[in-house]
Image (cartoon, grey):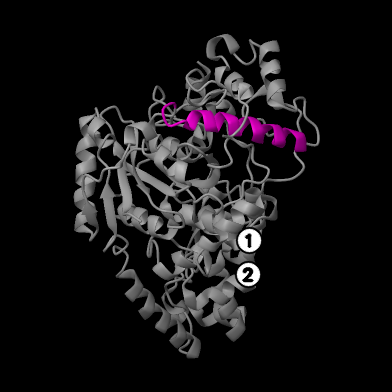
Amino acid sequence: MNTTAGSYALIGSEVARDAGVVERQRKAGAVMLGKASLSEWYRIRSINGVPNGWCARSGQGVNPYVPSGSPCRSSSGYVISVAANMVAVSLGTETHSFIICPSDHNSVVGLKPTIGLTSRAAVIPYAPRWDTIGPICRTVEDAVYVLDVIAGFDPRDDEATREGFKFIPEGGYFFWISEACISTGQRNCVVPRSQSHSIELSSESTSLNPLLFTFEGPCHSPTKSPSERDLGGPRMRVDRRGSKGHFCAFPLCVMQTGVFGPAIEQNPAAGFHSTVNAAISCWEFWRLRTSSRSMKDEEEDGRRKRGFVPSEREKHWTAIDVREREIAKRENEGLKGKRLGVVRSPFVDKLHDSAIAASFEDHLSTLRKRGAIVVDNLHIANIDEILDPHRSGELMVMATDFKISINAYLKELITSPVRSLTCIITFNQNNPELEKLAEYGQQTFIEAEESTGIGEKEIQVTSGSRASPILAIGGYPAITAPAGYDSDGMPFGIFFGGLRGTELKLVEIAYGFEQATKVQRPPRFSTLELSEKASV
């Protein structure tokens, strides 16, 4: 697949290797379905000209909630694919609200990691001093699973990832999910610390599996002991996260054919799958069973007791159950004691939709009730200048960075019809109809080509994504979670930002907010309807 940034200029180009984050995903068992559209060249071709979500190769991206509404910023296609339930996970480049804004506008979770936490190697650059790669998912939990896979050192992005590596917690982010018991009773494949040995035994490829499928029956919940598991009717279901069609191809459970064959026959929605994988919890359960008794013996008398005969292993599982129930009590404690500074001016103060303003106040009340320490009306010095890319000099720096970095990227390609920003500008001039040059221009490209060189507080909370430039300049992390819908049905989110390396705190807060509010709902339009609207 060509990597083209949505432009015809790079058709026929060939990269030397996968991007670093893609390599990590493949190793973890992810199935790559394709490349999504985006705002062409991250909209830097003409910042005030190219529409949000438009690129020459695929046309206009459509918001699945309100087709006439903006999908927002450069990573729009990636976010649309997740919001429209076409994929389980997508990755985007965040430079200047490129993940945060479209996630906000399409009712999904977008996570912007600290710069250097994830590799930018082999990713088409915009401004390396601000570029970072992050996950786009339907839930906070899914985003943490993906972050755990893609975060880490990469010698091809040595300087940044060497610095970012020190922020990764011991045990990684997946370990935090297990230990904090995220989504206890809601997610089927969360592994507690006491099962951590199975992670080593089963392979890294299981890390992404919990996003992709769900089991009921004998593999229903790792927090239940074998005696509580239902052996009478193995069933498989396609869960609400859109796992249908996104199963991995790495079987772990040797009994999968015997166990899931009837399930596939009984479930027409999943009948077209010939292979179903077992997640860590399923694999661990069968490993424990087959290590103590034969499957034949278990089949013969297992239904009588619907589980194990009492044994040391069962006592072990019972102990796990007690511990997990205690952990479950902490499900709503992610917000307790967290200091949240509310930046109202100019973000909340300029809200024009009363539904958004009212929802934001309700959410602040919920945060307080859940134990957060809300510091209201936090002010940021020189905020108007910071948010103006011309006054702050941000636009000039980004344009210069783009020229230098895109020239370096193009020179590394094995084959490419263009080898510099000058070549891209010339291509657009020679293909004005293909690239809609008259309508959208390329003024920022020209300005970039003419450039000559480079010249501890609380977590911040705002409504929407307009605060993202503050965090972009500092290389700070942020996360946005669905917060509601305006009077026209357009989604909006709540934005949490922190200092470098505070991803764990941010996801804890965002998860607590998500579980306390649960406002996310599926889009009204099907992918077919969206395709028809996009082609009009």
Measure how far apart labels 2 and 1 are at the Cα level: 8 Å
Q: Quadrant of the N terminus?
A: top right
Q: Is residue 407 a member of the stretch shown in magenta? A: yes
The reply to whether discs 2 and 1 touch (Cβ–Cβ < 8 Å) is: yes
Q: Which residue is identified by label 1?
A: 205
Q: Quadrant of residue 490?
A: top left
Q: Is residue 475 visible?
A: yes
Residue drawn where x is 58% and y is 83% of the image: 297
Q: Nearer the viewer, residue 499 or 416?
A: 499
- How far from the left and from the top, in percent, is residue 231? 48, 71
Amino acid at pointer 2: Ser
Q: Residue furthest right?
A: 414
Q: Is residue 211 above or below residue 229?
A: above
Q: Main secondary structure of the magenta part?
A: helix
| Element on which disc 1 rests | helix
Q: Is residue 387 a member of the stretch shown in magenta? A: no
Q: Is residue 485 above or below residue 519?
A: above
- How far from the left and from the top, in percent, is residue 113? 49, 50
Amino acid at pointer 1: Ser
- How far from the left and from the top, in percent, is residue 453? 62, 31
Disc 2 crowd, CA 10 A, few/some/many (<14, 14-19, 20+): some
| Element on which disc 2 rests | helix
Q: Which mark is residue 463?
A: none
Q: Which mark is residue 202?
A: 2
Q: Is residue 89 above or below residue 52?
A: below
Q: Which residues are magenta?
A: 390-412
- Is residue 239 toward the left or the right of residue 414 in the image? left
Q: Quadrant of residue 126?
A: top right
